[in-house]
Amino acid sequence: MTEIKDLKNRIARALEAAKSRGLSQGFIAREIGIKPQAVSQWKTGKAEPTRDNLIGLANITGVDLEWLTTGDETEFSASNTAPVRKPRGRAMPKYTIDQIGKGMDRQSPDKAGEPAERVHSYYACSRGSFALELTDASMQPEFHAGDTVIIDPAIGPEPGDYVCARFAGVKQATFRIYRHRGFEKDGTAIIELAPMNDDWATLHINKDNPGEIVGTMSEHIRPRRPR
């Protein structure tokens, strides 16, 4: 298949594939949470979707997020009308909080060490994504120890998103609610990392406490029965 360089044309191809399965643009727009006119504007190139909207479009239409974002079709058969996401999504390594905290390069998850196992994401996500097993009660009642979250480094966090973060010199990462609180005088971002459980402390990334957001949660997986 010839590479489709323009985003608008890849979006049009994804919409055509969805239409062949009975999914209208109106339905897709409602599922993403936008107006139908916005989808039409993406298709004509009058507007571009946000990263989160691209993820939603990939999930609903069933096309691969990497192809939709970049046009990379190397993993797919030329016989496809549009590259379709492989069954059960992308396989990815699963790490512990300790492994992520020991200096994982956000662009190279394998540097976190040998993963405990590999899991599959149900939804489309970037190639740098990884699974993270939660081990404490800081995010109860929504998240429990033993739950797994998919962390996607390609998704820029918005206020209220769930993120994985790490701090300089600390051997553990953390999973918290992201809140941007402005900037220091030198331009350093001030980030608040809030728990859902009031018994746990709110953490901060700032000039005096350097750290980084490793990635944003794209999926939450909970075991049916406790291990």
Image: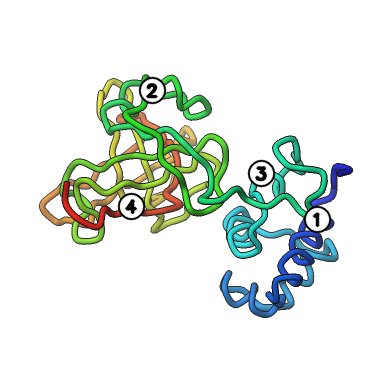
Disc 3: which residue: 66
**What is the CA distance from the residue labelled 4 to the residue labelled 1?**
39 Å
Q: Secondary structure at mark 4?
A: strand
Q: Quadrant of residue 191?
A: top left
Q: Where 136 falls versus 7 (above or below)?
A: above
Q: Is residue 185 left or right of residue 23?
A: left
Identified by mark 2, the residue type is Ala
Disc 2: which residue: 112
Q: Secondary structure at mark 1?
A: loop
Identified by mark 1, the residue type is Thr
Residue beneath the point at 68% across and 75% down: 23
Q: Are marks 2 and 3 in contact (CB under 8 Å)?
A: no
**What is the CA distance from the residue labelled 1 to the residue labelled 2?**
37 Å
- Give me the disc on residue 177: 4
Labels 1 and 2: the sequence-earlier one: 1
Q: Decide which of 113, 18 is in the foreground and name it.
A: 18
Labels 2 and 3: the sequence-earlier one: 3
Q: In this rendering, which labeled residue sits more in front, label 1 or label 3?
A: 1
Q: Is residue 185 visible?
A: no
- Give me the disc on residue 81: 1
Labels 4 and 1: the sequence-earlier one: 1
Coordinates of residue 40 in the picture (x, y in percent): 78, 72
Q: Where 133 falls versus 61 (above or below)?
A: above
